[in-house]
Amino acid sequence: MEIRERIAQLKRERRAILAAHTYQPPAVQELADILGDSFALAREAARSEADTVVVCGVRFMAEGIKILSPEKRVILAAPEADCPMARQIPPEQVAEFRQAHPDTAVVAYINTTAELKAVADVCVTSSSAVQIVRRLPQRDILFIPDRNLGDYVRRQVPEKNILTWDGFCPVHNAVTAADVQAARAAHPGARVAMHPECPPDALALADMVGSTAEIMKYIAESSGEIVVATERGVVDRLAERYPGRLHQLCGDCLTCPDMKLTTPERIVSALEGTGGEAIELPPALMAAARGSLENMLRYGS
Ligand code: 13P
Ligand code: SF4
C-alpha cells in the first residue's frame, strides 16, 4: 500500500490528525491536516475533535498541544526533535525573578519547556507577540527567552518597559546584515521578508517582518521576487508554486536540523504505535503551564 494511503487509513482508524509546522520537509507538510506557524498549531489542534494528534515539529509544540488538550493523545513523531532555545533558561531563575518583581509580567515565547511556561504569565508566538504585549495591563515586562524577538517587540511597543533574556534561535540568529546585503545585490528589486528571530541589524534591512504564516501570506498576496529570511521549509514547499519568485536567504544556513527529523515513515510508526512518543506530563505541571497558554489564546485572538 502506498504510504499516503496507509497514513489515511491509520488516521481514520485512530481518529487522528497530523499537525505540521511550516519548517517541516515538504513531504511531511503535504500530509498535514493542520499546517501552520506555532500559533496556528496550538489553536487549531486544541479546537480539533480528533482523539489523537500526531505532531510533526519539535517537542515544545507537542507539549503545548497536550497542555491545552490533556484528553487527547498527543504523539511527537520524532521524539528527539527539540528546540535548543526552549531550554536556554533555568525555570528557577525566572521564578526567583518573579518573586523579586511581582509587578512585572513574565512573557514566554511559546518556544519554551512546560516548566518555563509554568512560571510565565502569558505565552506568545512570533505572530502574536506584539499584539499580546500591547494588550497586557502591566507596563513592565520580562520577555523570555528570545532576545531578538523581545527586541523586535520592544521597538513595536515603545510604551512598555521590556527586559529581554539572552536566549536566541541558533538558526535565525546566524543571519547577518551582510547576508541581506548580498541577497539584495544578487536579486536587485526583490523584497526581503524576515522572521523576527533574526538579529536586529539584519531585521533593520528587511521590507517585512513576520512569523512563518505571515511571510507565507505576504508571498501569496504580493507579486515580484522575495528573498525569504526564515528556515528553508517555507521556500522548499512554496518554490514550485511561485516559480522564479522566491529566493532562500543564505542557502543552507537557514536549516533547522530538529525540524527535519520527521519523515512520512515515522508518521506511520507514530500512528501504528511502534514509534513516536506519546507526550505525558505531570498533571500539576500541566495545570501550572495551562494558564499562560490560555492567556495567549485569549489575548492573541
Ligand atoms: P513561528 O512558527 O511562530 O513562525 O516560529 C518559528 C519557529 O522558529 C518555530 O520553531
Ligand atoms: Fe528552535 Fe530555531 Fe529550530 Fe525554531 S528554527 S525549532 S526556534 S532552533
Image (cartoon, helix red, strand yellow):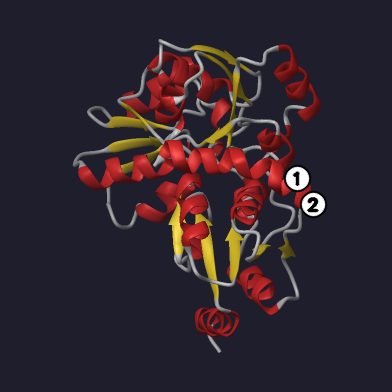
Q: Which quadrant would residue 33 be assigned to in this image?
A: bottom left
* Residue type at numbered disc 2: Pro
Label 1 CB less than 8 angstroms from ligand 2 = no
Is residue 177 visible to the viewer in this orientation of the structure?
Answer: no
For the N terminus, the quadrant is bottom right
147, above or below 128, in the image: above
Q: How many marks?
A: 2
Give 44 or 101, whichever is nearer the viewer: 101
Q: Position of residue 142 (x, y in %)?
A: 60, 18
Q: Position of residue 177 (x, y in %)?
A: 45, 18
Is residue 237 visible to the viewer in this orientation of the structure?
Answer: yes
Give 30 or 294, whichever is nearer the viewer: 294
Residue depicted at x 62% and y 49%: 64
100, above or below 203, in the image: above
Q: Which residue is mark 1?
A: 285
Residue depicted at x 41% and y 55%: 237
Residue depicted at x 39% and y 33%: 210
* Residue type at numbered disc 1: Leu
Label 2 and label 1: CA atoms lie apart by 5 Å
Give 22 or 225, whichever is nearer the viewer: 22
Q: Position of residue 205 (x, y in %)?
A: 36, 18
Instruction: Look at the numbered disc 2 and give the secondary structure of its residue.
Output: loop
* Label placed on residue 226: none
Image side of residue 48 versus residue 170, left or right: left
Badge 2 vs badge 1, beta-carbon distance below 8 Å: yes
For the C terminus, the quadrant is top left
* Label placed on residue 282: 2
Sort mark 2 into few (<14), some (14-19) or many (20+) by Cα contacts within 10 Å.
few
Residue depicted at x 59% and y 53%: 68
Image side of residue 184 versus residue 67, left or right: left
Sort mark 1 into few (<14), some (14-19) or many (20+) by Cα contacts within 10 Å.
some
